[in-house]
């Protein structure tokens, strides 16, 4: 390619546009002078015969690409940006500029961000970059229409795009690929259903991707939505990589200062793609709370208790790429050999404190890592360190019975109270952990202790633990621990109160949903006192829908609750009713309590609707 200095002495964009128009006209007239220019700069025509070159479709967009490459630029946008910079030279970036400014300057220099976009990023965007620019009136109605065609929002999990509309609009106005294409690409990248638009825009020469890499952005959304093909296309095109850190949280309460790895931590294939495209450079970068990407694998930010192995495959990929395997992460993985190795290197690590104030024993307890907890305690770990932000000791987080007994055997305080005054027994009864509550009481937990709101563990007990609350007669409430847990599933059926459930259990030996279905099938349920014709009909519908929304698609514990919500909350009595709710968008509303994205997808699968 010729050097960029081959440009006219005072280039301007209109002059260059006229050159492209002249080239297109020359080709259209069959001029042989156009043949080598097209053949040299359009890969699709490389090696083609003269006749084939003259017969080829040659748009104004193609002509602009040829002109740009003749002047030594990869695409028209880079040529236009260079000409603009000659007319309005940017202010030099000094050596003392902050990292954000230097990063933005590099993006502008490399043609991955326009100077105008850079102004918004440096000013501090409050939304996604394209949204801020839209609100500021940076785009025309025509450009916004082009972006809208790249991603058409539909009911949840069913977003799509209109590639034919994109193609038609580009035929009418080729400059849209430069003026609106980058923002359209960003919009399309957020949803799997818009993958054809991503492919189309890149193939048609979109010059870059409009986004703010320093904040939660469209790349984050694509990683979280497992849009691996879309991200791969963008990475392969050179428009972005996975090495940036997003400084603010995506939503209040979520961790800040995380990279794309955080959003992909449950998907090993996506994680591998990110590591291959720069995320390996941020493996040791902690979030605002001091958690590294590896630690996020085993320490769920949302407070989930108990072992969570769904992230482990991604974590192993981090380790293969050289992530430091610290004592906190090792306890989370229940890797007792690694913990032993670290103790041999430095015995004081058993009482080390993480940046968030937690101790290794907190991590072992939270992940039910019995072997690691035992090794830590036998190596001198403090049994009741306090996690500052919550006031939790490891005992608060222990959910495994063996681990609870291990901690108590080493002197853990069974009645330790967190910052809200809650004991382990408060937690157990409030989350309906009957066996754990019974176990704690047998071990001597104080049932009279009150939390910060003045409530005992019995006062905050959920339905499954309600029998623990004392009655005036001194008798335990029904159902007690001798009644199978499956009885509570019956109480989820529409129209059934606990009084009726008890009658079914004691008088008709009904102990599970299978028993209720048997009575529905033979009609005997309709004869039970307290069950109206309307209730019988609703229960019958529940079982009919349950046969469609099979347990293979949705666990029973979630399935029956979802079906109950559909029947009672939305009047569903058939598959046709579900289809109607999907088509009119009712089920896509985020306000529909109890139906998350996963359940929505399962419902669509079960009734045969593509998404």
Image (tube, rainbow, N blue to C red):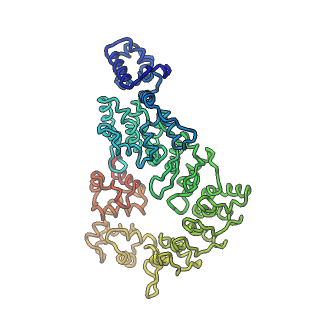
**In the shown orientation, is residue 329 left or right of residue 267?**
right
Q: Residue at x 33, y 13 (%)?
A: 30
Q: Nearer the viewer, residue 81 or 536?
A: 81
Q: Is residue 294 visible?
A: yes
Q: Is residue 401 visible?
A: no
Image height check: is 99 above or below 584? above
Q: Nearer the viewer, residue 585 or 499?
A: 585
Tell me residue 61's x, y (percent). 36, 26
**In the shown orientation, is residue 96 left or right of residue 578?**
right
**In the shown orientation, is residue 307 left or right of residue 28?**
right
Tell me residue 145's x, y (percent). 30, 39
- Residue 171 occupies quadrant: top left
Q: Residue at x 74, y 57 (%)?
A: 344
Query: Number of marks in the image?
Result: 0
Farthest left residue in view? 533
Image height check: is 89 above or below 384? above
Farthest bottom residue in view? 473
Tell me residue 371's x, y (percent). 65, 62
Farthest top residue in view? 32
- Residue 439 occupies quadrant: bottom right
Q: Nearer the viewer, residue 428 or 346?
A: 346
Tell me residue 529's x, y (percent). 30, 77
């Amino acid at each position: 390619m010729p050097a960029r200095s081959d440009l006219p002495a005072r280039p301007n964009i209109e002059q260059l546009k006229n050159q492209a128009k002249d080239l297109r006209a020359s080709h259209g007239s069959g001029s042989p002078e156009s043949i080598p220019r097209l053949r040299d700069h359009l890969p699709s025509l490389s090696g083609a015969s003269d006749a084939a070159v003259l017969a080829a479709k040659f748009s104004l967009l193609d002509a602009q690409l040829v002109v740009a490459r003749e002047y030594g630029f990869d695409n028209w946008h880079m040529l236009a940006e260079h000409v603009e910079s000659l007319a309005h030279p940017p202010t030099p970036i000094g050596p003392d500029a902050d990292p954000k400014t230097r990063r933005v300057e590099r993006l502008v220099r490399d043609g991955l961000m326009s100077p105008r976009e850079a102004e918004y990023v440096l000013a501090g965007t409050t939304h996604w970059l394209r949204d801020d620019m839209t609100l500021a009136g940076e785009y025309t109605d025509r450009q916004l229409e082009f972006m809208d065609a790249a991603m058409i929002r539909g009911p949840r999990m069913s977003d799509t795009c209109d590639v034919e509309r994109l193609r038609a609009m580009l035929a009418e106005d080729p400059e849209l690929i430069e003026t609106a294409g980058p923002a359209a690409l960003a919009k399309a990248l957020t949803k799997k259903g818009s993958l054809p638009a991503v492919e189309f825009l890149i193939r048609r020469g979109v010059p870059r991707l409009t986004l703010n890499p320093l904040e939660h952005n469209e790349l984050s959304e694509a990683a979280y939505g497992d849009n691996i093909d879309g991200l791969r296309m963008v990475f392969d095109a050179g428009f972005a990589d996975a090495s940036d850190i997003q400084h603010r949280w995506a939503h209040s309460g979520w961790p800040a200062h995380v990279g794309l790895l955080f959003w992909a931590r449950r998907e090993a294939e996506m994680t591998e793609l990110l590591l291959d495209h720069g995320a390996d450079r941020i493996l040791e970068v902690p979030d605002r709370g001091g958690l590294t990407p590896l630690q996020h694998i085993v320490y769920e930010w949302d407070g989930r208790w108990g072992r969570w192995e769904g992230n482990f495959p991604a974590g192993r990929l981090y380790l293969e790429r050289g992530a430091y395997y610290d004592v906190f992460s090792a306890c989370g993985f229940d890797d007792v050999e690694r913990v032993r190795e670290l103790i041999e290197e430095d015995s004081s690590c058993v009482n080390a404190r993480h940046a968030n104030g937690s101790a290794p024993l907190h991590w072992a307890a939270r992940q039910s890592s019995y072997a690691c907890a035992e090794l830590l305690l036998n190596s001198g770990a403090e049994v009741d360190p306090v996690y500052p932000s919550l006031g939790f000791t490891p005992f608060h987080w222990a959910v495994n019975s063996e681990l609870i007994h291990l901690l108590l055997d080493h002197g853990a305080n069974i009645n330790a109270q967190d910052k809200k005054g809650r004991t382990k027994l408060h937690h157990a009864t409030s989350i309906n952990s009957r066996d754990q509550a019974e176990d704690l009481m047998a071990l001597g937990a104080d049932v009279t202790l009150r939390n910060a709101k003045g409530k005992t563990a019995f006062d905050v007990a959920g339905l499954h633990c309600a029998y623990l609350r004392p009655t005036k007669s001194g008798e335990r409430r029904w159902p007690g621990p001798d009644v199978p847990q499956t009885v509570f599933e019956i109480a989820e059926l529409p129209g059934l109160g606990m009084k009726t459930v008890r009658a079914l259990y004691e008088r008709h030996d009904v102990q599970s949903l299978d028993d209720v279905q048997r009575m529905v099938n033979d009609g005997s349920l309709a004869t039970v006192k307290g069950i109206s014709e309307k209730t019988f009909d609703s229960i019958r519908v529940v079982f009919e829908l349950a046969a469609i929304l099979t347990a293979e698609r949705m666990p029973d514990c979630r399935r029956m609750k979802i079906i109950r919500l559909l029947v009672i909350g939305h009047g569903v009595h058939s598959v046709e009713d579900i289809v109607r709710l999907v088509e009119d968008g009712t089920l896509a509303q985020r306000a529909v309590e109890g139906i998350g994205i996963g359940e929505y997808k399962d419902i669509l699968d079960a009734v045969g609707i593509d998404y």
